[in-house]
Amino acid sequence: FYSPEVTKIALEMKKMLENIKSKNKENNNNVENKKQSKKESKTNYSPNNLTDSCENNITCNHKKNNNNKSKKNTNDNDNNDHENNKPYESGGFFHPHPLLVVKKDPIIKNVENKSTVESDTLEIFDKYKLQYIPLDENSYVSHNKVSYYFPAFKYSAENGIFQYGYTHQLGGWVECGKFVKWMKSKIIKLGGQFIYSEVDFLLYNKKDNTNHNNNNLDDDDYEKSYFVYGVQLKPSSSSSSIDISCPQKLYSSNVIITAGAYSKKIILSESSNSFSYPHKELYLNLLKPSAQPVFYYKFLKKYEQNLSYFKGKSFPVFLADIVNTGFYGFPSHDENDLIKIGNHFSGYEIDDFSEQGIERLTQRVKPQEEQRFTLFLQKVFPDLLYSKVYAHKFRLCLYNDTFDGDFLIDHDPVVDGLFIATGGSGHAFKFAGVIGDIIADSFERKDNIYSNRFKWRTNSNKNAKFGDKLRSSKTVNDETIFSNTNNDIILKPDITSSTNN
């Protein structure tokens, strides 16, 4: 919603959906369907996970035993399945759904100095002639109300919590796991290779031909006195996707870091027998990893039929006054029958990036987040309570926030050969289909319309609010976001008796 590129993708998506519908009408003949199925099965692609010889003079020797063959075959079949999954077709990873944006206050466009995410998006809809339906009490059509189109929001609309908003029918959501596996199969088909190992630290060295000590990093003529020449890997874990034995060092004259929330940790990691990153202060006030809470709610079987308006097209992808509340969500679908609800706020600081450290943080914040999410359900979706759903899963979504909410895609200013592509600030995944071209252009020092916006920059404001402009400013336990309603539901879902179902 924030760039012509995304709008263009949405229009192309609509065209593809229309073509698919037309194609389905033409293929009603069962015989033709069988022929098509046979034809597709013959063109299945079964990529290898890793070739026997890696580039850059690094040799990876597969451990050839029965267990590893079994693992490899399983992984090949997995890649094969996702290679054949078409994004917009049945069984793919894109699910068309309407988008619903709701607020407790009216959304007013074209008001100077009172811009909001919701009003900005409407202006872009108007600019690119994308249709949307206003949903508020003052609409000229009597049934243009949130509760008419989306019955699940009836309670919150009638009680003055979210009675204003709009819906955009050309929306949807993508299953991240399936998409990543599909992209992986594409990369392998193009000759890409995957080495499953954790990075310990980067290999830095100082150039011999310079004694430059100028620390004025604002000077465009600043000479890079250090360079990166590869990465040090940790010993392969037995739990890795492929059990291989590789050297612990990978050598390269260029290293591109696309490690999300782990990027700063990798760049600044120290080694006792190697140079460390020379100017750590550059990253300390530029990138801030954070952890955001997400719950997955599952229906109890006996209530599923009575809660149909929380499924299918009647339940949208929603932003619930997100700048004030932080809450957003996705509908369930047939495969897992889970409703996903998350909160987009300043987040929890991460002091330990190990798997055990993330798990400790998850368990530490879960009780207070469960209380906060239950409050949201009470005020917005009370029908989901009374033990009709239970918290099936809780996890933390890791962000890598910049101080201005924009990506950081540029060459490092002091280390030659080091390139950074990170700073997703909570909105990185939706750009997965277009961000590669921008990264490639910036790496090759080619101009693109975003290179100046995403280039290396410094943060002079130590009190800057990290993250994108959608981020809720409310604290974890702030209940004032629902202060305009007098309905206090105190009954909490009985998840103790339903967890085993």
Image (cartoon, helix red, strand yellow):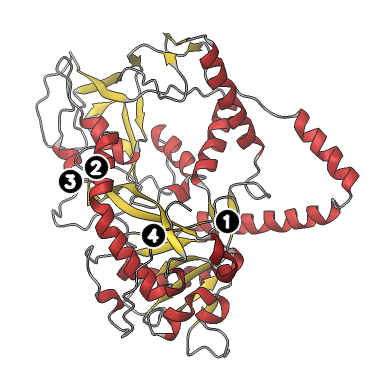
- Mark 1, residue position: 333
Which residue is more in the foreground, 257 or 127? 257
Among the two numbered marks 4 and 3 on one chain, the one whose residue lies closer to the N terminus: 3
- Mark 4, residue position: 495
The amino acid pointed to by label 2 is Arg
Using a 10 Å C-alpha cutoff, classify the residue at mark 2 as few (fewer than 14 neighbours), some (14 to 19) or many (20 or more).
Answer: few
- Mark 2, residue position: 360
Label 4 vs label 2, nearer the camera: 4
Q: Which mark is residue 285?
A: 3
The amino acid pointed to by label 4 is Ile
Please tell me whether mark 1 sits on a helix, a strand or a loop: loop
On the rendered structure, is 455 left or right of 77? Answer: left
The amino acid pointed to by label 3 is Asn
On the rendered structure, is 399 left or right of 35? Answer: left
Please tell me whether mark 3 sits on a helix, a strand or a loop: loop
Mark 3 vs 2: CB contact within 8 A? no
Residue at 27%, 41% in the rendered image? 358
